[in-house]
Amino acid sequence: MLIEMIGRLEGDFRLVVAGDGPLAGWLENEAKACAPGRVRLLGHIGDRAMLRGLYVDCDAFIHPNPREPFGIAPLEAMAAGLPLVAPNAGGILSYADETNAWLAEPNGESFAAAARSVFNDPAARKDKLARARWTARQYQWRVVTDSFFQLYDELIDQFPSSRFARRRDRPAAFPVPEEYEQPGCLESHPSPRTHAGEHRGSGYWRDPGRADSWTGSRDAS
C-alpha cells in the first residue's frame, strides 16, 4: 500500500520508512521497481535522538496498519506536531478521528488523497494539529495513571467486601498473613488524584517487600 501511495503522489513527495521486519527486502525491491529514488528504508531506529530528528524533519507521518491494536508511534507523531495519515480502522481510532488526523480507507489511492489534503488546506491543518497535540497530552503517563487510580476507587466502592479493598477503618474480608501485621510493614497512601470534583479514596495499602508495589510519586512523564 505504501509503494502504491507514493507512486500516485506526483511532485516532490518522498517516503522514508523507519523500522524492520521479514518483508523489508520485498519492500525495497518493490520501491526500486515502482518508485525508484523516492523511497528510503532506514531499518530499525534504536537511537532516541535519531528518532526525534526524524519526527522533526518529516512533513507528515503515514501509518498504514489497519489492524493496529493501539499504536504508540502515531500518538508520538501527534505529540510531535506531525500530521497523521492513518487508516479508518483498528485500535488507532480510540484516539484518532477526523478532527485530529487524516483518516482514509486502507489502500494506496485513498492514502495518496489523504496525504495531498494535508498540504492543500493550511487552516484545516493548523486546527487538526492543535487538536492532535491536545489528544496526545491525554495519554501522558500522569493522566493515564490518574485514570487507573480512579478506576481502583470505583472498583473498591463497588466491591467493598473484597480483600483488596481493605482500609484502615474496616477489617479485611480475608485473613491477612501475620507478617503483614507487624508495625510499619503496611503503609497507607492517599489517592494521588487531585482533580477538582473527584472523590478521594481513603488510602491504598502496599507491601514494601514487593517489587511491583507503588512506593512513591506516580508523576512520571
Image: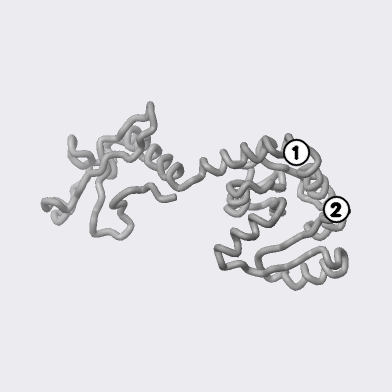
Q: Indicate how the structure is coloured in the image.
A: one colour
Residue 180: give its label.
none
Report which residue position mark 1 lands on: 122
* Mark 2 neighbour density, 10 Å: few (under 14) some (14–19) many (20 or more): some
Residue neighbourhood size for the residue with mark 1, other residues' Cα within 10 Å, grouped as few (<14), some (14–19), many (≥20): few
Q: Is residue 70 visible?
A: no
Q: Residue 180: image x %, image y %? A: 17, 53
Q: Which residue is mark 2?
A: 9
Q: Residue at x 32, y 37 (%)?
A: 156
Check disc 1 and report its element: helix, strand or loop: helix
Near-viewer residue (206 or 12): 12
Q: Tell me the element at label 2.
A: loop
Q: Nearer the viewer, residue 38 or 180?
A: 38
Seen at 63% across and 52% down, the residue is 68
Which circle, 1 or 2, is nearer the viewer? 1
Q: Is residue 204 above or below residue 34?
A: above
Q: Amino acid at mark 1?
A: Pro
The answer to whether any part of residue 52 appears in the image is: yes
Q: Position of residue 69 (x, y in %)?
A: 60, 51
* Placement of 14 over or under 93, stated as above or below: below
